[in-house]
Image (cartoon, rainbow, N blue to C red):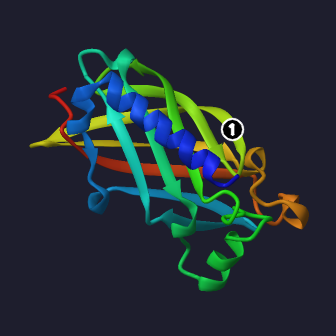
Amino acid sequence: MSLRPTLRFAAVVLAIAAAAPAAAQQKLVPAQSEISFTSKQMGVPVDGRFRKFDAQIAFDPKKPETAKIAMAIDLASVALGVAETEAELAKPDWFHIKQFPQATFQSTSVKPLAGGKYEVAGKLAIKGASRDVVVPVALAQNGGQTTASGQFAIKRLDFRIGDGDWKDTSMVADDVQVKFKLVLAGVPAL
């Protein structure tokens, strides 16, 4: 059962690779990339990040509407700086990592805006729940690398993150801000 999301992600990656051979040249540079988040516990911001994630990108700046983006985030790689809290997040009330080891994102459309900015719409799946999201992305290039950055908000309860007693949003807020900086190699000139 827990292999199903991984197999689905693998099928998406294979479909992207088959549909766009040039995409094989585009890849994430993990050591320079980051995905972080901020939530609030009793009104106090709590910052975290994920140490392991991967992305499959097929993006042509001249045809952004044909772009395909697939991401997988290893939920066990969550880092909050407190070992006890990180261990708690692995439990069924939070990420339920044994059953749902990854969060995934699959783009459905990319809309160009002005000045190297885009709106990427897609499906975000966490803990067996899938929601449509629109992610604003700014692209910048330096040498052979492209940096895609942005931030967006999710509601943790939409993804059943914080079940049981943790559904009470007076302790842990429902809103979570997600920020990312993805460094990519092989993207054509903007």
Q: Residue at the spot x=49%, y=49% of the render?
A: 72
Work out whether residue 122 or residue 128 is closer to the camera in this orientation and state it. 128
Label count reads 1
Work out whether residue 24 or residue 32 is closer to the camera in this orientation and state it. 24
Please, is residue 120 above or below residue 184 in the view? above
- Which amino acid, mark 1? Ser
Query: Whole-percent x and y of residue 126?
Result: 65, 49
Q: Residue at the spot x=72%, y=63% of the render?
A: 96
Mark 1, Cα crowd under 10 Å, few <14 / some 14-19 / many 20+, is some
Look at mark 1 in the image and give the residue it sits on.
130
Work out whether residue 76 or residue 80 is closer to the camera in this orientation and state it. 76
Q: Residue at the spot x=61%, y=43% of the render?
A: 153
Query: Whole-percent x and y of residue 154?
Result: 65, 44
Query: Whole-percent x and y of residue 65?
Result: 38, 16
Q: Secondary structure at mark 1?
A: strand
Name of the residue lying farthest toward the left: 143
Please, is residue 123 above or below residue 159 in the view? above
Work out whether residue 97 or residue 10 is closer to the camera in this orientation and state it. 10
Determine whether, in the image, residue 177 is placed left or right of residue 148.
right
Q: Quadrant of the C terminus?
A: top left
Query: Whole-percent x and y of residue 40?
Result: 68, 63
Identify the image quadrant of residue 45: bottom right
Q: Residue at the spot x=56%, y=74% of the render?
A: 80
